[in-house]
Image (cartoon, helix red, strand yellow):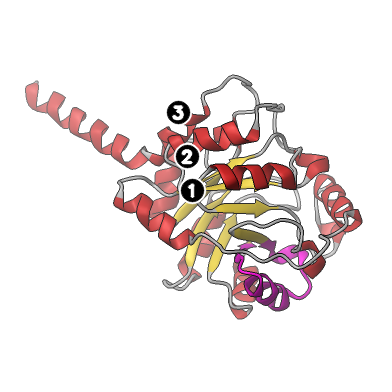
Amino acid sequence: MNSDTELAPAVQSILEAARERAGGGGVVDVDARSLPDALADAEADGRIPVIAEVKPTSPTAEGTRADDPVELAEAMVEGGAAAISVLTEPTHFGGSSEALTRIRAAVDVPVLRKDFVLDEDGIDVVAADLLLLIVRFVDDLEGLVAAARERGFQPLVEVHDRAELETALEAGAEIIGVNNRDLANLEVDLETFESVAPEVPNDVTLIAESGVSSPADVRRMRAAGADALLVGSAIMDHGAGDSDVTENTRRLTRAESAEATASTDSRTETDQT
């Protein structure tokens, strides 16, 4: 694990809270829904594979959404989300394991537990289809990847640069997320994904994380090689508590078809002039 001094104060606080939280009471056993299959189903349906995130708040959010998490997840699936990510970190993100359990029972798509898992004890908290493991925060990544798989989880291994990507590949990661947010200063740069993606083997499922807020961003990440996009704030829209989560999801899952329609309309107008 990199030194906490290299992290933004908000991230240091999150890690301190994670170290203090207790793990589960026993080993979790998961019968996971396949993320690659869900992404393929979305593609076949003409949707861009989006993992929509139920995130009540965050250190970088402009507000808090107090909507029922199940209703939010169902709205995201209605908007075309291929999978759902659920924050279970309670102190800084307002999440809970209970919310994840309720969501997973209510939807038929894969559900990712997004939290700050530091050791094997942190795995055994709640059943989910996928489990986030962040390279920067883990000492024994290979051991945690193996432990997660033994329980049935699909580990989503998060990296930020090429060195972390190499660590993830050496640990056997098959699903990798590239976080466009720099945890040292919380700044977002979509060029991060574009710089790392070319080094990712073709047989790895590659996910772009953070900073995707518009259909144009979606198309940019897809052009750079993203198999899917993990989107939270742009869908939750914390600054507008009554924002339509279904429509927010749909405008991203249909970003490519919308572009094609706009292009066709433009050509038609040109032909008529």
Q: Which residue is mark 2?
A: 77
Which marked residue is nearer to the observer: mark 2 or mark 3? 2
Q: What secondary structure is found at the residue carrying circle 2?
A: helix
Question: Given contact means CB atoms under 8 Å apart, are the residues at marks 1 and 2 in contact?
Answer: yes
Taking the magenta stretch, the answer to whether it contains residue 151 is: yes
In this image, 219 relative to 33: left or right?
left
- Residue in the picture at 77% in, 47% down: 89
Amino acid at dot 1: Asp
User: Between residues 235 and 30, which one lies in front from this camera angle?
Assistant: 30
Q: Which residue is mark 3?
A: 247
- Residue in the picture at 41% in, 71% down: 202
Q: Which residues are magenta?
A: 133-158
Q: Which residue is mark 1?
A: 108
How far from the left and from the top, in percent, is residue 96?
75, 44
Q: Residue furthest bottom?
A: 170
Marks 3 and 1 sit apart, C-alpha to C-alpha, by: 20 Å
Question: Given contact means CB atoms under 8 Å apart, are the residues at marks 3 and 1 in contact?
Answer: no
Amino acid at dot 2: Val
